[in-house]
Image (cartoon, helix red, strand yellow):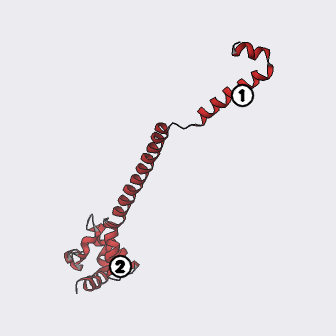
């Protein structure tokens, strides 16, 4: 007697055989393919590494832009010399009328703050410019 004929003759054995096959199939499905799992873990690790690298590069770029810019240099020099808002505004106006690309040059070259050579608009503020020049270069 074969299993198939036995299963047809005994209905209870058919259920047992089906349950046995189902159990084996579910055990195979429960197993994890380690190669595939390692591949997914490596891909996830690579993505995390790329995100961390991108964050670091953007942070470094922002730090350089914040601290190594001409604007920041001018602000730092004004802060170091204790200049108030009006003095900073006057320096920016002088730099603009002198057509200086970098207003920080006013701190290194006193010729730009010479009251005798001021453009027409700033001549009425010559006394303020002279006081500012003495304060910066005295």
The spot of residue 64 in percent (x, y) is: 33, 62
Mark 2: give few (<14), some (14-19) or many (20+) Cα within 10 Å.
few
The spot of residue 113 in percent (x, y) is: 24, 77
**Of tags 1 and 2, which is closer to the observer?**
1
Mark 1: give few (<14), some (14-19) or many (20+) Cα within 10 Å.
few
44 up-or-down from 82: above or below: above
Q: Say which residue appears at 76% left-offset and 22% top-offset.
A: 13
Q: Identify residue for label 2.
A: 79
Task: Give the image quarter of residue 130.
Answer: bottom left
Furthest-bottom residue in view? 138
The spot of residue 87 in percent (x, y) is: 35, 79
Q: Say which residue appears at 40% left-offset and 78% top-offset.
A: 85
Q: Say which residue appears at 77% left-offset and 14% top-offset.
A: 8
Instruction: Say which mark, if any, is on residue 19.
Output: 1
Q: Nearer the viewer, residue 54 or 15?
A: 15
Disc 1 and disc 2: Cα gap in Å? 83 Å
The N terminus, quarter of image: top right
The spot of residue 112 in percent (x, y) is: 22, 74
Instruction: Say which mark, if any, is on residue 68.
Output: none
The C terminus, quarter of image: bottom left
74 up-or-down from 6: above or below: below
Q: Say which residue appears at 42% left-offset and 55% top-offset.
A: 55
User: For numbered disc 2, what is the local secondary structure?
Assistant: helix
Q: Nearer the viewer, residue 66 or 31?
A: 31
Task: Give the image quarter of residue 16.
Answer: top right
Q: How many marks can you see?
A: 2
User: For numbered disc 1, what is the local secondary structure?
Assistant: helix
Q: Earlier in the sequence, mark 1 or mark 2?
A: 1
Q: Is residue 18 left or right of residue 55?
A: right
């Amino acid at each position: 007697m074969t299993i198939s004929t036995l299963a047809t003759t005994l209905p209870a054995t058919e259920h047992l055989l089906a349950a046995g096959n189902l159990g084996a199939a579910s055990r195979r499905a429960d197993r994890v393919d380690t190669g595939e799992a390692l591949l997914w873990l490596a891909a996830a690790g690579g993505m995390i590494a790329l995100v961390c690298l991108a964050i670091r590069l953007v942070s470094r770029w922002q730090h350089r832009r914040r601290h190594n810019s001409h604007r920041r240099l001018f602000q730092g020099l004004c802060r170091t010399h204790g200049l108030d808002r009006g003095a900073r505004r006057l320096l920016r106006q002088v730099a603009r009328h002198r057509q200086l690309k970098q207003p920080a040059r006013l701190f290194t070259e006193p010729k730009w703050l010479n009251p005798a050579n001021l453009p027409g608009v700033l001549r009425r503020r010559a006394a303020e410019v002279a006081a500012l020049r003495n304060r910066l270069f005295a």
